Image: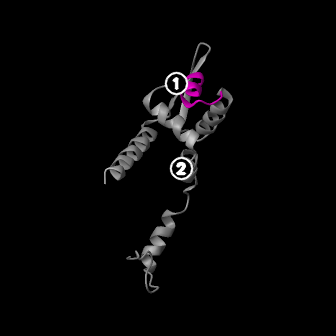
C-alpha cells in the first residue's frame, strides 16, 4: 500500500513567498466568521433554503423541522454577519439572502460538491 507524502522531506522555505502570504493572512476575521457561521448545519440549511426562496420564520421552522425560537436565534446570528436580511410585510417578517455574493458562495459550494460526487 503506497503512502501519500503530505510534507517535504527536507525543510526549505522561500522567504519572499512566506512574507507575501503572511500579509494576506491579516484581517481575515470576517471571512472566518462567515465560514464558521456556515459550518453549523442548521445555519447552512437556513441559508441554503433562502437561496431557493424568500421565507418567513414560520416556513423555515416547518421546512427545517425546528422550533420557531431556534430558527429565530440562528436568523439573528446570520443577520449580524449580514448573510441574510429581512423585510416586514404587515405582521409577517420575510428573510432572504443579503446579496448575490452569498448566493454565489452557495452555488460554488453546490458545484464543488457535485463535481466531487461525480469523480
Task: Check if residue 111 falls in the magenta segment.
Answer: no
Disc marking residue 13:
none
Residue placed at 56% from the left, 31% from the top?
64
Residue 39, how many percent across, how many down? Answer: 55, 48
Residue 119, how many percent across, how many down? Answer: 31, 54
Left or right: residue 73 versus residue 115 is right
Name the dominant secondary structure of the magenta segment.
Answer: helix
CA neighbours of label 2 inside 10 A, class few (<14), some (14 to 19), many (20+): few
Residue 47's place in the image compared with 29, above or below, is above
Viewport quadrant of the N terminus: bottom left
Disc marking residue 55:
1
Residue 57's place in the image compared with 99, above or below, is above
Q: Earlier in the sequence, mark 1 or mark 2?
A: 2
As helix, strand or loop, the secondary structure at mark 1 comes to strand
Left or right: residue 21 versus residue 119 is right
Residue placed at 41% from the left, 46% from the top?
109
Residue 7, how many percent across, how many down? Answer: 45, 77
Identity of the residue furthest to the right in this view: 69
Q: Label 1, label 2: how many angstroms apart (C-alpha)?
A: 22 Å
Location of mark 2 (residue): 35
Left or right: residue 69 versus residue 106 is right
CA neighbours of label 1 inside 10 A, class few (<14), some (14 to 19), many (20+): many
Residue placed at 38% from the left, 46% from the top?
108
Numbered disc total: 2
As helix, strand or loop, the secondary structure at mark 2 comes to helix
Identity of the residue furthest to the top in this view: 90
Identity of the residue furthest to the bottom in this view: 10
Q: Which residue occupies the foreground of this view, 35 or 111? A: 111
Quadrant of the image occupied by residue 67: top right
Residues in magenta, as a range:
55-67
Identity of the residue furthest to the front in this view: 1
Residue 8's place in the image compared with 58, above or below, is below
Amino acid at each position: 500500500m503506497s503512502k501519500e507524502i503530505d510534507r517535504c522531506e527536507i525543510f526549505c522555505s522561500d522567504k519572499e513567498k512566506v512574507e507575501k502570504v503572511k500579509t494576506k493572512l491579516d484581517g481575515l476575521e470576517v471571512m472566518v466568521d462567515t465560514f464558521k457561521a456556515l459550518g453549523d448545519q442548521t445555519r447552512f440549511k437556513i441559508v441554503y433554503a433562502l437561496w431557493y426562496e424568500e421565507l418567513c420564520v414560520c416556513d423555515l421552522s416547518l421546512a427545517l423541522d425546528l422550533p420557531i425560537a431556534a430558527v429565530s436565534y440562528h436568523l439573528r446570528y446570520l443577520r449580524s454577519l449580514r448573510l441574510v436580511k429581512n423585510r416586514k410585510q404587515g405582521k409577517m417578517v420575510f428573510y432572504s439572502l443579503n446579496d448575490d455574493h452569498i448566493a454565489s458562495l452557495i452555488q460554488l459550494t453546490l458545484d464543488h460538491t457535485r463535481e466531487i460526487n461525480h469523480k
